[in-house]
Amino acid sequence: MNQKEYFGFDSIKNLKDILKQENPNKIFLVTGKKSYEKSGARNSIVKYLQNYDFVHYDNFSSIPLLNDVKKGILTFKNKKCDLVIAIGGGSVIDFAKLTNILASQDKNIVDYATNVADIEKPSKPLVAIPTTSGSGSEATHFAVVYVKQKKFSVASQHILPKYSIVDPEFTKSLPPKITAISGIDALCQATESYWSVNSTSLSRSISKQSIKLILDNLLMDVKNPIEKTRLSMAKASNLAGKAINLTKTTAPHAISYPLTYFFRIPHGQAVGLTLGKFFIFNSTMDKFNATDISKLGDYPKVFSELLDTFQVSNEISAKQKIRKLMTDLDLEVKFSMFNITTNDIPLIMNNINYERLHNNPRKISRNELKTILISLI
């Protein structure tokens, strides 16, 4: 499905025309519990909703849980909603995407959530309006959901929002910490997309634009934000979302999910913890450990280009640059800061998302994975 995208300050005004075109009987309005008010989104869209019947729904966790989605589906169906508007960060938009698509399917939703069954039917139109610059969820055709402590990714072209409105105005009220964490998430997405086994010249071109924007703007957007940095980071996040929409993410994301679920480490922070390590790990491949041997000859050029994009001479310098950026952003770079010890390593290893790990350009053994995790304590 092709997406209609609106981007830039004051782009929220396009919601009026979207509503006029869709002419919904009842809107399912999904928002964060606090961000809807704090971001200014509520004040911005109330005038557009005044002539429409809508259900405001925010009864779900900050981590997309299947049980929460089930409850959302009941409300969605009972109220006979025929349009979804999602306003918030990645978890909010993912929740809306999941509720919307799974409400349209016929089989047990657990089967869809755990990838046993394929999405067959289209969903209702969805308008995604991010209030953070990080997840890029408004630009992807998949959504994260946790089923009994395990993370799954539900994917289908039917999940891609029909409309996205990326208005940086809604990121102005973000606390510095959230801005930093969201920005690092976008950097990880763009970087992982670049080296993913699924990468193409198109996806790498998109990733490169995103990485450059982030490296040029994120620190200032956290320490001394202005409209230019807000606009640049909104663009970077959207581009990172478009990149992983083509390639999906890799090892740092695969490892991040148990860190978030079991230790409540914010997603972007969790991914950033291992990005530098995998910059080095992935840069050394051979025919014995390459995930896709047919692409092995491409990777010297891929990593050379990636180093140029990071403006460093080698992978160790890239790791150091990522670490310095995170410390400058007042983000943690060690597991120990989250009270993770060597005793917790088996829990992390046993709950890694192996689907994402299989997108990594270099295979990783359990011993190699354990070594990387222990080195971060």
Image (cartoon, grey):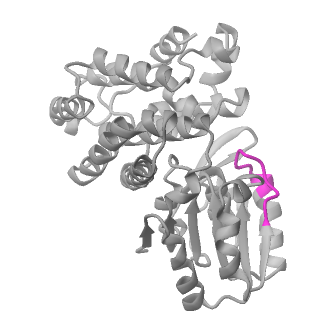
- Compared with 64, 86 (above or below) is below
Residue that appears at 38% across and 34% down: 360
- Compared with 251, 5 (above or below) is below
Examine the structure image and report whether residue 96 is included in the region drawn in magenta. no
Q: State which quadrant residue 148 falls in.
A: top right
Q: Position of residue 178 (x, y in %)?
A: 60, 39
Q: Position of residue 248 (x, y in %)?
A: 42, 47
Residue that appears at 43% across and 26% down: 275
Q: Quadrant for the C terminus, please.
A: top right
Q: Position of residue 263 (x, y in %)?
A: 71, 26
Q: Is residue 104 visible from the viewing direction of this image?
A: no
* Total numbered circles: 0
Q: Magenta residues?
A: 57-68
Residue toward you, 42 or 26? 42
- Compared with 198, 344 (above or below) is above
Q: Position of residue 276 (x, y in %)?
A: 40, 22
288 displayed left or right of 20: left
Identify the main secondary structure in magenta: loop
141 displayed left or right of 343: left
Examine the structure image and report whether residue 59 is included in the region drawn in magenta. yes
Residue toward you, 30 or 297? 30
272 displayed left or right of 151: left
Q: Quadrant for the N terminus, please.
A: bottom left
6 displayed left or right of 123: left
Q: State which quadrant residue 351 falls in.
A: top right
Residue toward you, 14 or 62? 14
Q: Is residue 140 visible from the viewing direction of this image?
A: yes
